[in-house]
Amino acid sequence: MIKAVIFDLNGIFLESEFFSKRFEEKYKVPGEKFMTALKAVMDIVRKPNAPAAFTLWKPHFDNWGLYLSEEEFFDFWFSGEKLVPSLVNYVDELKSRNLKVFILSNNFRERTEYYRSSFPNFFSKFDEVYFSWETGFVKPDKEAYLNLLKENSLSPQESIYFDDSDKNIEAAINLGIISQQYEGLEETRKTIESLLKAPSKE
């Protein structure tokens, strides 16, 4: 029987229109060009001791002829991300059934600081929240998952993991963690219910 539910954050609890699309519409930078820059920046800032994220974006803005301040850029980015209330409420339901609930997210300092200040009650619902820039473990590195399991005395078989990234799910499955592509609250609820009702193999 499962004892813990582990969720990715973005694309699950936080929904938004594709950032590249929003940016192209507002600043006329082609989505493909923007995504190339986004990947390069995120590969760096998701790790501990990374430089300030805006310093990595600034050369791209200069190249595109954009004059954006740090505040303007991050406000535009982060304010477009909204919590999904129904899923947030579901966390309370899971906790009421004595399940541990975690977030395991590849993310960077400026973004998580915005989240923590904007959604303080949200993060307090979880047993623990793991951000790669704080832990040093970036999914799909197996250590990202093993670190969470070890710190919370969980076996892979006692946990189920939801993500919207195929490579992250594959990495978790390879460790023996029950894992599933996130496809909305109802499918998540069905999956968890079936696992809770399954007879124990012990």
Image: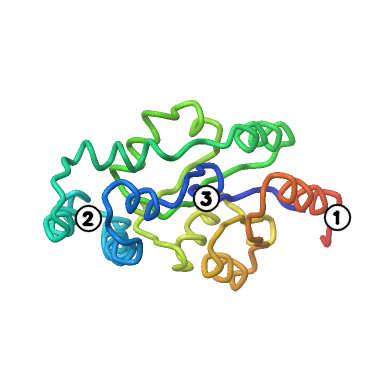
* Residue carrying label 1: 198
Label at residue 30: none
In which quadrant is the C terminus drawn?
A: bottom right
Q: Is residue 100 above or below residue 191?
A: above
* Residue carrying label 2: 50
Residue at screen point 20% across, 54% down: 57
Picture quadrant where residue 40 is located: bottom left
Residue at screen point 35% across, 61% down: 31
Disc 1 residue type (three-letter): Ala
Disc 2 residue type (three-letter): Ala
For the residues labelled 1 and 3, say whether their Cβ atoms are less than 8 Å apart: no
Residue 65 position, x and y percent, is 13, 54
For the residues labelled 1 and 2, say whether their Cβ atoms are less than 8 Å apart: no
Q: Secondary structure at mark 2?
A: loop
* Mark toward the start of the polypeptide (1 vs 2): 2
From the image, state whether disc 1 or disc 2 is nearer to you.
2
Residue 97 position, x and y percent, is 74, 36
Disc 3 residue type (three-letter): Gly
* Mark toward the start of the polypeptide (1 vs 3): 3
Residue 62 position, x and y percent, is 11, 56
Residue at screen point 34% across, 58% down: 136
* Mark toward the start of the polypeptide (2 vs 3): 3
Q: Is residue 136 left or right of residue 147?
A: left
From the image, state whether disc 1 or disc 3 is nearer to you.
3
* Residue carrying label 3: 11
Residue at screen point 63% across, 42% down: 100
Q: Residues within 10 Å of mark 3 (few under 14, many from 20)?
A: some
Q: Is residue 117 left or right of residue 192?
A: left
Q: Residues within 10 Å of mark 1 (few under 14, many from 20)?
A: few
From the image, state whether disc 2 or disc 3 is nearer to you.
3
- The alpha-carbon separation of the residues under discs 1 and 2 comes to 44 Å
Q: Is residue 100 left or right of residue 142?
A: right
